[in-house]
Image (spheres, rainbow, N blue to C red):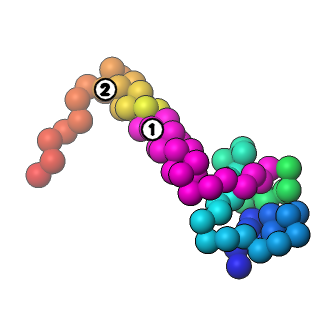
Amino acid sequence: VLEHRLVLEQMLGRPLRQDEHVHHRNRDKADNRPENLVLVGSSEHSVITSEITQERIRRDREELERYRRLYGPLPPEE
């Protein structure tokens, strides 16, 4: 059993169902303090995961653009 699931199960006083997920509010998966955990359903978890992925893509694109402004285009792949 993953620690974050165990902590939430103890908080709820029951086992989690397979379709229930645990979201870390501060996005730090090592932070399993009860106040950092929230129970979400499968669809809500998918939305959260998608938003996080889109945010990472945006940050990566910004970083790539900063790199290109500083050093020019990336070298072609062989």
SS majority, magenta:
helix
Residue 28: tell me if it is visible.
no
Amino acid found under the numbered disc labelled 2: Arg
- Disc sitting over residue 68 in the figure: 2
Horizontal arrangement in the rendering, residue 43 relative to residue 78 (left or right): right
Horizontal arrangement in the rendering, residue 1 relative to residue 18 (left or right): right
Horizontal arrangement in the rendering, residue 65 relative to residue 21 (left or right): left
Quadrant in which residue 21 is drawn: bottom right
Vertical relation: 35 (above or below) 11: above
Q: Is residue 55 magenta?
A: yes
Amino acid found under the numbered disc labelled 1: Gln
Horizontal arrangement in the rendering, residue 11 relative to residue 1 (left or right): right
Q: Residues within 10 Å of mark 2 (few under 14, many from 20)?
A: few
Residue 49 x/y as whole percent: 53, 48
Q: Secondary structure at mark 2?
A: helix
Label located before the other in sequence (2 or 1): 1
Q: From which residue to which does the magenta span run?
A: 36-57
Identify the residue position indicated by label 1 in the image. Answer: 54
Q: Residue at x 33, y 20 (%)?
A: 69
Between 18 and 66, the one nearer to me in the picture: 18
Choose mark 2 or mark 1, whichever is in front: 1
